[in-house]
Image: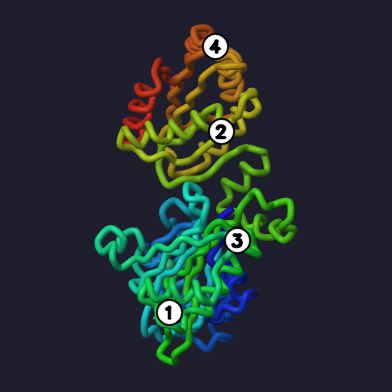
Amino acid sequence: MDLYEHQARGLFEEHGILVPRAEVTDSPKKAREIARRLGGRVVVKAQVKTGGRGKAGGVRLAADPAAAELTARQMLGMDIKGHTVGKVMLAQPVDIEAEFYVSYVLDRAAGRFLAIASAEGGMEIEEVAASRPEAVARIHIDPAEGVTSAKAGEIAEAGGLPPQTVDVLVRLWQVLVREDAVLVEVNPLVRTRQGQILALDGKVTLDDNARFRQTRWGAQEKEHDDALEAAAAAKGIDYVKLDGEVGIIGNGAGLVMSTLDVVAGCGARPANFLDIGGGASARTMADGLSVILSDPAVKSVFVNVFGGITACDTVAEGIVRALDTVQLTKPLVVRLDGNNAARGRAVLDEHAHPMVQQATTMDGAARRAAQLATKA
Ligand code: GDP
Ligand code: MN
């Protein structure tokens, strides 16, 4: 589970990492009050679970409380890479002298954690790594040893971070271990003109496998990514919102994952991940379709089903019945293959819904759905 910036900074704070004073709200009026409390001038930051908010207009300086209200009003409801801004954080501005990058991430292949550190913070680390790989230090961490002061010193030196950051590096490791995270990232970690080391941004991914022992997670989860994910979660559907325009429904996580790849290979971008699982009842199909169709970014929908235990004709009947309850506002491309595929196709042919087309192969269906999405 990914956390919002304001949730991540809450964890940093609990572990003794300095962060700027800040408060979160979903109301422009409250934004004005908060700005007043924080001294007038504030940084307004969109709370969305995606990076690069700065470039997308999701991080802006407001000179006074009135400007903070206006900025908050503009930012709330804004779309950043397919994520709707539901809350903004207002933070006391910081006089930045230097920006650093630091993260710990689980390296599954190595069976270790990886520390990544760079003196070129603030920018996207992937870009730094691509253009100047020598500026990004990567050091493995033995999970049994963890990040001691000595190890933190080694990481700081390799990344070109000042010795003052060692304490933060140790504390950040404690965040990872105690909170059961598989990723903690601070970009930028800054040195202020006053010489303080502050975490100005934070990304934390919690390890879902640790759910059983992390009773506090319930509260974090209540703040869902967006209304769609919340609606899907309420219906018990495995749905993840993505940034594209081709809605996707499939049966089985593996098939859905490869469907995303095939759609991307056709030059379109998937709008979501949605696995209806093995059952694929009319009910699940209707719930899945209604979640996808209520995403305004979706231009076409690709239903990709490989009949195994669940036969294609059952799925086709599910689709037909779903269309009784869901108004189809966008073209649907259906590919049925596997168990009882011919019967399934016949069911859809017979129904002859004007917005439904069939394709016999996964590639063909993906191409069609991609075309429909880019034409729309
Ligand atoms: P991101 O673009 O989603 O990674 O959002 P960040 O929180 O990292 O903000 C982007 C950039 O805005 C940072 O790298 C800083 O350069 C700048 N920024 C954010 N907060 C402040 C602040 O309080 N003062 C100053 N001067 N710059 C800030
Ligand atoms: Mn950042």
Residue, disc 4: 339
Whether the residues at callouts 4 and 3 have beta carbons within 8 Å, the answer is no
Label 3 secondary element: loop
Q: Quadrant of residue 34?
A: bottom right
Judged by depth in the image, the label closer to the viewer, 1 or 2, is 1
Residue at 71% from the left image edge and 57% from the top image edge: 214
Real-space Cα distance between discs 3 and 2?
A: 37 Å
- Residue type at mark 1 is Val
Real-space Cα distance between discs 2 and 4?
A: 18 Å
Residue 275 - label: 2
Residue 221 drawn at (x, y percent) = 65, 55
Residue, disc 1: 190
For marks 4 and 1 on the same chain, the one whose residue lies earlier in the sequence:
1
The image quadrant where one finds the C terminus is top left
Choose between 251 and 373: the one closer to the eye. Answer: 251
For marks 3 and 2 on the same chain, the one whose residue lies earlier in the sequence:
3
Residue 242 drawn at (x, y percent) = 46, 45
Residue, disc 3: 144
Whether the residues at callouts 1 and 2 have beta carbons within 8 Å, the answer is no
Left or right? Give the position of 71 relative to 124.
right
Real-space Cα distance between discs 3 and 1?
A: 29 Å
Q: How many residues crowd around disc 3 within 10 Å: few (fewer than 14), some, or many (20 or more)?
A: few
Whether the residues at callouts 4 and 1 have beta carbons within 8 Å, the answer is no
Judged by depth in the image, the label closer to the viewer, 4 or 3, is 3
Real-space Cα distance between discs 4 and 1?
A: 58 Å
